Amino acid sequence: MIPGGQPNMQQLLQQAQKMQQDLAAAQQELAETPVEGSAGGGLVKATVTGAGELKALVIDPKAVDPEAGSAEENAETLADLVLAAVRDANASAQQLQQQKLGPLAQGLGGGGIPGLPF
């Protein structure tokens, strides 16, 4: 602080720059972190990044058992399992985002600094 109770603008800008760098680093880490979700007791597994991008989908052959019902029923069940696995993976990715980005967002104080883009 400088006399008169005004914050040091240089110090504020440096803090803002550091927070922006920390946020960018956390976002990059999320983009590179694989997160897995599953459905049907592991018959379908989806892998997304911490940012929510679908990277892989593994379907156990047992999930498409031709003796379990008609082709339409099997296709519908498989589609439901895929959706559930992707949703499960995305829910885990969102938790990871909260862990990584939540503290940084709080550090920005919600309102940020007037005139800066955060």
Image (tube, rainbow, N blue to C red):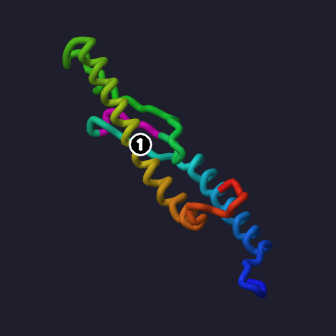
Residue in the picture at 27% in, 23% down? 77
Residue 47 in picture, x, y percent from top left: 46, 39
Residue 55 in picture, x, y percent from top left: 52, 36
Which secondary structure is most common in the magenta stretch?
strand
Residue in the picture at 29% in, 20% down? 76
Residue in the picture at 75% in, 69% down? 14
Residue in the picture at 48% in, 60% down? 99
Asked if residue 98 is positioned above or below residue 109 in the image, the reply reads above
Residue 26 in picture, x, y percent from top left: 60, 57
Identify the magenta region: 42-47
Circle 1: residue type: Ala
Q: Where the C terminus falls, by quadrant?
A: bottom right
Q: Nearer the viewer, residue 117 or 98?
A: 117
Q: Secondary structure at mark 1?
A: helix
Q: Which residue is mark 1?
A: 89
Tell whether position 44 is magenta: yes
Residue 109 in picture, x, y percent from top left: 57, 66
